[in-house]
Image (cartoon, rainbow, N blue to C red):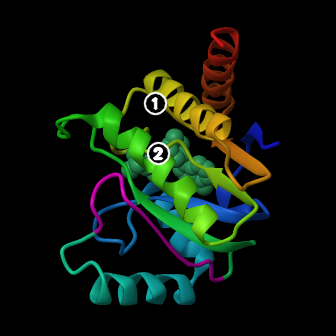
């Protein structure tokens, strides 16, 4: 059985097999959680992203897609980079956000990881309304877990108490509607 947990923490300090990065299409680092992951991951992580961009994604990684690299100095085995939708610009931000969660899980399984932690993708600079994003995250992950995934632990990371409450609300609602 796979557990779905909510943890209030800095995702760069969490010991876990896979850390999901809310990357941008360039894969070259940015603001928010992306910047924090690159800062702590260090040169090895940034160089891996540059190489991947060069060899596989010259036009950038598509919104909703996910790809793994080494984790550098992070207390993780791999970083899974996924590109969240820009809420105000994407034609279907809800579907693309669900893709981020689904494709990141798939990537973690392909990498043979046993645990994975997600930040609240798109809810910072990319402007996705937080409660709606939390509902999509929880619904998509629960659906995948029901279908069966080869992971022991899936963690939703909140970066503030307010964000933790939003995630807890989404999880309570989803569990009551089963
Ligand atoms: P996006 O560009 O996808 O909107 P942001 O990094 O701006 O990504 O924000 C996504 C979420 O990550 C926000 O809810 C923000 O509070 C959270 N966040 C920022 N830094 C960290 C961190 N170090 N650990 C966990 N979550 C973080």
Residue 63 sits inside the magenta stretch: yes
Residue 1 lies in what quarter of the image? top right
Residue drawn at (70%, 67%), measured in percent from left and top?
Answer: 113
Point out the image quarter for the C terminus. Answer: top right
Marks 2 and 1 in Cβ contact (< 8 Å): yes
Disc sitting over residue 121 in the figure: 2
Element marked by disc 2: loop
Residue 118 sits inside the magenta stretch: no
Element marked by disc 1: helix
Q: Nearer the viewer, residue 102 or 32?
A: 102
Pinpoint residue 121: horizontal percent, then vertical percent: 47, 45
Pointer 2 residue Cβ closer than 8 Å to ligand 1: yes
Looking at the image, tell me whether mark 2 or mark 1 is earlier in sequence order. Answer: 2
Q: Which residues are magenta?
A: 61-72
Q: Using the rendered image of the protein, determine whether residue 122 is visible from the camera's viewpoint.
A: no
Q: In the visual, does 102 lie left or right of 76?
A: left
Pinpoint residue 11: horizontal percent, then vertical percent: 66, 56
Residue drawn at (38%, 90%), measured in percent from left and top?
Answer: 51
Residue drawn at (29%, 54%), measured in percent from left and top?
Answer: 63
Q: Is 93 above or below relative to 103?
A: above
Q: Nearer the viewer, residue 132 or 12?
A: 132
Q: Is 155 above or below relative to 131?
A: below
Q: Which residue is mark 1?
A: 133
């Amino acid at each position: 059985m796979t557990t779905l947990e909510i943890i209030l923490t800095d995702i760069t300090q969490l010991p876990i097999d896979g850390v999901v990065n809310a990357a941008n299409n360039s894969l070259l680092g940015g603001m928010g959680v992306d910047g924090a992951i690159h800062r702590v991951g260090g040169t090895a992580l940034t160089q891996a992203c540059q190489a991947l961009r060069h060899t596989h994604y010259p036009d950038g990684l598509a919104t909703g897609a996910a790809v793994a690299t080494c984790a550098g100095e992070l207390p993780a085995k791999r970083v899974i980079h996924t590109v969240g939708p820009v809420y105000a610009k994407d034609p279907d931000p809800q579907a693309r956000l669900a893709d981020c969660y689904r494709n990141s899980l798939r990537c973690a399984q392909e990498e043979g990881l046993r645990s994975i932690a997600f930040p609240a993708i798109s809810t910072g600079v990319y402007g996705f309304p937080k409660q709606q994003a939390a509902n999509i995250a929880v619904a998509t992950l629960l659906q995948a877990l029901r279908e069966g995934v080869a992971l022991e632990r899936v963690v939703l990371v909140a970066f503030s108490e307010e964000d933790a409450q939003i995630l807890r609300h989404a999880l309570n609602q989803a569990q009551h509607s089963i």
